[in-house]
Amino acid sequence: MQIVKADGKYRVYGENIEVYDELEPDFYQFMVDDNGPFITRTSRPEINYKVYGTDQKKVEKCFNTYKSFNRSLGIMLVGDKGNGKTLFAKQMCSKMIDAGYPVINVTFYHPSLPTFMTQISQECVFLFDEFEKMFEHDEKRGSMQNEMLSTFDGINMTKKMFIITCNDISRLSQFIYNRPGRFHYSFTFSEPCYSDIENYLKDNINPDTCTEKVEDITLFSYINGLNYDCLRSLVFELNNGYSLVETFDDLNIGYGEDKSGNVSIVFSNNETLEGRFGFTPFSNNMVSCDVHPKRSWYSVATVRFQISDLKYDTEKDLYILPENVVIEWDNVSATDNKERKDAIMYYRALKPLYFKVNIHKKMKVNPLRHDCTYDPDSETGIYYGDIEEEGVPCKESRLTKRSENLPGIGFHVG
């Protein structure tokens, strides 16, 4: 028997008692029993596979920021499931452990958690994976998230790093998003870009057993927005000799929401006509939309094409050849506006070079870094722009109306 006195209270323990001044740099799990909260050492997250994308640059950025901060650092990882949030969190935690900081993984809420976190007097990392699911937020019934706010502020506690991942940002408290004082960074994870998909497939497809071409699988995956979870399952089936058609029929994919995109007719004199369309992923239905001169209110033609005719080029991104597109020019009547009449006649005489297509991605748009354009098809005013990462155009865009605007994704000027 051993007796420990703490805060004026005596507790009886068994013989195996060890006392530490600080936690060793390792991975720990937050737990609670009848005696209150505690942590237990668990296996450290391992990354024994190749990492795709540019996440490592952001990991280094977060680490350097934490080192230079004189207060706690909060990091939000936001986006649809299967696009790399948990992997980024693992990379960040591994980096911090290697640098000498313990990491405490929190997988559930308990009223004792905020006090327990403040009692740890050394610098460390707290990880909350799928935060919005573990910490319910309801303004009427009470919010577990709001009870954590003062803890995230770092009041009366040693500097910490807080990492939360979130699939559905609409379920976050309004006192968490748009608050860089609490969560300094908010990284949005979207579907992998074409080059990342291509590299993943080249590394993992077995050419001896797979009957499909890598470029065909890449294009299919890119257009339909497959995440890394889907790609991993897709590769497994294809490497077993199954066709892409059969694999898609059998896999648990293809139930996502409809997507939208922009199409631009690029003419020989570099002028363009633009339009917006919607389509159902994994379908081969005919897509049609009205097109109009840039920044104009009137349409001049309707274009029709099939998603399966899309091609990819490193400069054009997604495009369609003119022979695979039907253009139906609008009729001109005596009552038409003169500007519209002239536009129809002018563009009708031009020769289309190709049709450029953008599939919209769920990413937050930075008005300071992008060439934002007004969309005349919008009822309320929509702005959009090409997404860039580290100064390199990614040729992706996202449209967001106020009615469907989620915090941190897109922006609106009305």
Image (cartoon, rainbow, N blue to C red):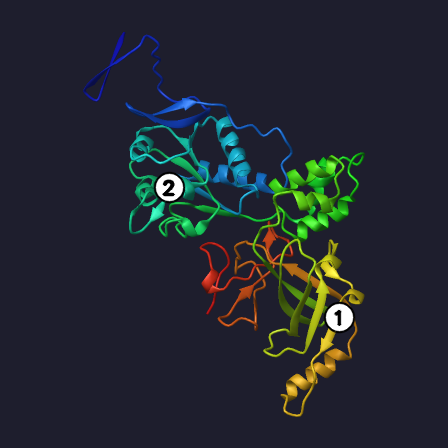
Q: Where is residue 374, by image quadrant?
A: bottom right
Numbered tag placed on residue 414 in the rendering: none
* For residue 289, side relative to residue 91 (left or right): right
Number of marks drawn? 2
* Circle 2 residues within 10 Å: few <14, some 14–19, many ≥20: many
Q: Are marks 2 and 1 in contact (CB under 8 Å)?
A: no
> On screen, 107 above or below 185?
above
Amino acid type for the residue under numbered disc 1: Val
Q: Residue at x 41, y 52 (%)?
A: 178
Q: Residue at x 76, y 72 (%)?
A: 269
Q: Is residue 196 visible in the rendered structure shown here?
A: no
Which of the marked residues, 2 or 1, is nearer the chain's N terminus? 2
Numbered tag placed on residue 135 in the rendering: 2
Badge 1 element: strand
Amino acid type for the residue under numbered disc 2: Phe
Where does label 1 land, which residue?
326
> On screen, 126 above or below 286?
above
> On screen, 1 above or below 318?
above
* Circle 1 residues within 10 Å: few <14, some 14–19, many ≥20: few
Q: Residue at x 50, y 23 (%)?
A: 43
> On screen, 250 above or below 7?
below
